[in-house]
Image (cartoon, rainbow, N blue to C red):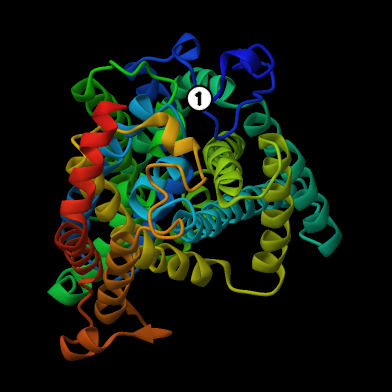
Amino acid sequence: MTTDSNREQITDSGFGEIERRGIDYIPASERWAKPSSLFWMWGGAIFNVEILVYGAVLMSFGLSFAQAVVIIFLGNLSYIFLGLTSLQGPEAGTTTFIINRASFGPKGSKLIATFNWLTQVGFETEGLALIVLAGLALAGKLGYGSSTALKVVLILGAAAIQLVLPLFGHQTILKTLKVLFIPFLVLFVVLGMLTLGKVNVHAVHHGANWQTMLEGLAFILSASGLGWTENGNDYSRYLPADSSKKATVWWVFLGTFVPSVILMILGAAVATFAGSASGSITGIANAFSSWFVWPYLIVAIFQLFAINSLDLYSSGVTLQAIGVKITRWQAVLIDTVVSTILTAYALFAASFNALLQEFILFIIVWVVPWTAVYLVDWLLRNMRYSAADLQDTSERGLYYRNGGVHIPGIIAQLLGMGAALLTIDLSPHYVSIVSEMTNGADFSVFAGLIVAGVSYFVLGARSVRREAAQEIAA
């Protein structure tokens, strides 16, 4: 925990100042946010063309429009998990993967943090690639084509720009996203009005079978709430410890569920008349009059920079949680370089859309079991943590246990991942045994959640409750 002696040296940044705090404890004097702040932040991020594309991609599964609407509604209910995984930050005063030491131990948590770092960098790469594709589309409208040199310039330019907001940090990100909320909303209102006259809800008459619907649900679950759970406390940690839990969950859910449902349904609606082209950022714009392409792509670029800021911020503090001895701004710089290299690969050497679908579905394997373990652990310890012990990685720390590893957490995580792998469908690259037996059904989300959560409860309930008594005493 940050001591009073160095509190003046490491202080929270205001708007427009570089934040110097990383994974250290946020003292009460610096808890400036309130639950409604999370509504504006998440709403500003989720009103995003990336979410629109997810709805269009869902239609490529062969679903009818009605089936897509049902799946979008059900899948986005998973944002309740994001609300629940935003409740630990105010109590613990630190980031997700420092709190994660309670579930897995200081050393065991590093393995899970590595999974998260790779996931965040993957999302950063996705966003950066979409920015470049939007830039290429605008360049094409100006008659510049899409040469290799232009791609390189756009990749490097986009990487330099996206570095700025996460570098300044938490308060600047939240306030910037609040400002951008309204213009983002206006764009999609216009898009919705343009779509109403063209949508063909009967484009697919018979729809898909229940197996394909499950696969589509898995895609939406991982692209929505379950794909963000590991980020929640990185932003809620600036809320006072006595913040209303009900208000926190409500504002997070409201700021994510509503725009996600609206945008995904809108994306699915566009796909009913634009076809497979709508599964890309430029394809959606080209489905309308030429005048709409410019404002759509320009606003889309701003939106993608905004949502990438959340990923870059979280990946930076996650890299610190892994144990890399660097400051938060240095971590953001490293992550920018890595995502830039991966973006170049995605745009020059691979099929971007194929990579996107495989990445979104595959993160289910680790994120879903982790979410279950993380929340069960929190409930077992009566929603309390010893903030000082979370920061203590020595043998004296409450969460050190067996050589720095909490064995029940690791076993439950592995069992949950195994259950997800046995029931997932990543056709044509990987089809699990259960998926083959059920003609393509994907039960990975449910299997991962249930197996990991039950396993952790059975293996760790007694020891975690014993620790909980010590946390209260502390």
What is the total number of numbered labels drawn onto the structure image?
1
Name the residue: 19% across, 69% down: 447
Q: Is residue 247 above or below residue 455?
A: above
Q: Is residue 226 above or below residue 207?
A: above
Give the percent coordinates (x, y) of residue 336.
Answer: 70, 48
Give the percent coordinates (x, y) of residue 147.
Answer: 81, 62
Number of other residues with Cα within 10 Å of mark 1, as a class: few under 14, some 14 to 19, many 20 or more: many
Q: Nearer the viewer, residue 230 or 149?
A: 230
Residue position for label 1: 177
Is residue 299 in view from this perspective?
A: yes
Is residue 209 in view from this perspective?
A: no
Q: Nearer the viewer, residue 3 or 42?
A: 3
Q: Nearer the viewer, residue 338 or 464?
A: 464
Q: Nearer the viewer, residue 345 or 338?
A: 338
Name the residue: 57% across, 52% down: 322
Residue 335 placement, left or right of 118: right
Query: Residue 436 occupies which quadrant of the picture?
Result: bottom left
The residue lying furthest to the right in this view is 149
- Label 1 SS: helix
Give the percent coordinates (x, y) of residue 171.
Answer: 55, 19
Query: Which amino acid lies under the numbered mark 1 shown in the image of this protein?
Result: Leu
Query: Residue 340 occupies which quadrant of the picture?
Result: bottom right
Give the percent coordinates (x, y) of residue 386.
Answer: 35, 32
Query: Residue 189 occupies which quadrant of the picture?
Result: top left
Name the residue: 18% across, 44% down: 465
For the C terminus, which image quadrant? top left
